[in-house]
């Protein structure tokens, strides 16, 4: 069954000019781009997007980092794209993320309170539907 996922190239990825490289990996894997938009996320959008992390020690640094510059928001489509993109992205910690993944090949640790790891990808069909409605309400109407 075809599904959709929300992918974000976070501000570190946009700032490092890796948007094209990351989009290219999504396309090269065979997924279809449904929507792509460069935007500066508001705190309102970010607090909804990261609601599950509210109260954690890295929550405020995470939201501040995501507010610090433009993000490339993407909806991609294909069979099993949700787990497929999580696999392309690699583990949360970029230092130990497997080589061959976006985080493993392009990411590293920086001296910041939040882990900067270039991308976000929805982790389940429920998260994908919820997150697409936050970032691209026009696609969920
Ligand atoms: P994920 O992005 O791999 O799904 P989550 O656990 O959902 O990881 O965390 C969301 C984001 O919050 C991560 O991508 C990373 O930027 C940041 N983060 C997660 N855990 C930590 C931590 O322990 N310290 C600092 N930042 C973290
Ligand atoms: Mg997550």
Image: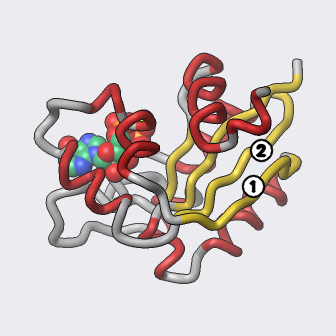
Q: Residue at x 40, y 43 (%)?
A: 44
Q: Is residue 118 above or below residue 15?
A: above
The one nearer the camera, 41 or 117, is 41
Q: Residue at x 65, y 35 (%)?
A: 132
Q: How far from the left and from the top, in percent, is residue 66?
A: 37, 59
Q: Which mark is residue 26?
A: 1
Locate ligand 1 by image quadrant: top left
Q: Is residue 46 left or right of residue 120?
A: left
Q: How far from the left and from the top, in percent, is residue 75?
A: 73, 45
Q: How far from the left and from the top, in percent, is residue 113?
A: 15, 59
> Which numbered disc flags the more N-terminal residue, 2 or 1?
1
Q: Answer yes or no: do the residues labelled 2 and 1 have beta carbons within 8 Å?
A: yes
Q: Quadrant of residue 48?
A: top left
Q: Quadrant of residue 111?
A: bottom left
Q: Nearer the viewer, mark 2 or mark 1?
A: 2
Q: Is residue 89 left or right of residue 45?
A: right
The one nearer the camera, 65 or 22, is 65
Q: Which mark is residue 117?
A: none
Q: Is residue 21 left or right of residue 98?
A: right
Please say whether residue 17 is visible from this viewpoint. Answer: yes
**Residue that badge 2 annotates:** 76
The secondary element bearing badge 1 is classed as helix
Q: Is residue 4 above or below residue 120?
A: above
Which residue sits furthest left? Answer: 57
Query: Which quadrant holds the C terminus?
Result: top right
Q: How far from the left and from the top, in percent, is residue 63?
A: 29, 51
The one nearer the camera, 120 or 61, is 61
């Amino acid at each position: 069954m075809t599904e959709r996922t929300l992918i974000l190239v976070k501000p570190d990825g946009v700032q490092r000019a890796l948007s094209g490289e990351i989009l290219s990996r999504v396309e090269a894997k065979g997924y279809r781009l449904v929507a792509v938009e460069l935007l500066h996320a508001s705190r309102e959008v970010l607090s909804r997007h990261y609601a599950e992390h509210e109260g954690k020690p890295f929550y405020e640094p995470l939201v501040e980092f995501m507010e610090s510059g433009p993000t490339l928001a993407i909806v991609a489509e294909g069979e099993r794209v949700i787990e497929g993109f999580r696999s392309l992205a690699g583990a949360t910690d970029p230092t130990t993320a497997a080589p061959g993944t976006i985080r493993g090949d392009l990411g590293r640790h920086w001296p910041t309170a939040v882990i900067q790891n270039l991308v976000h990808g929805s982790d389940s069909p429920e998260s994908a539907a919820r997150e697409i409605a936050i970032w691209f309400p026009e696609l969920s109407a």
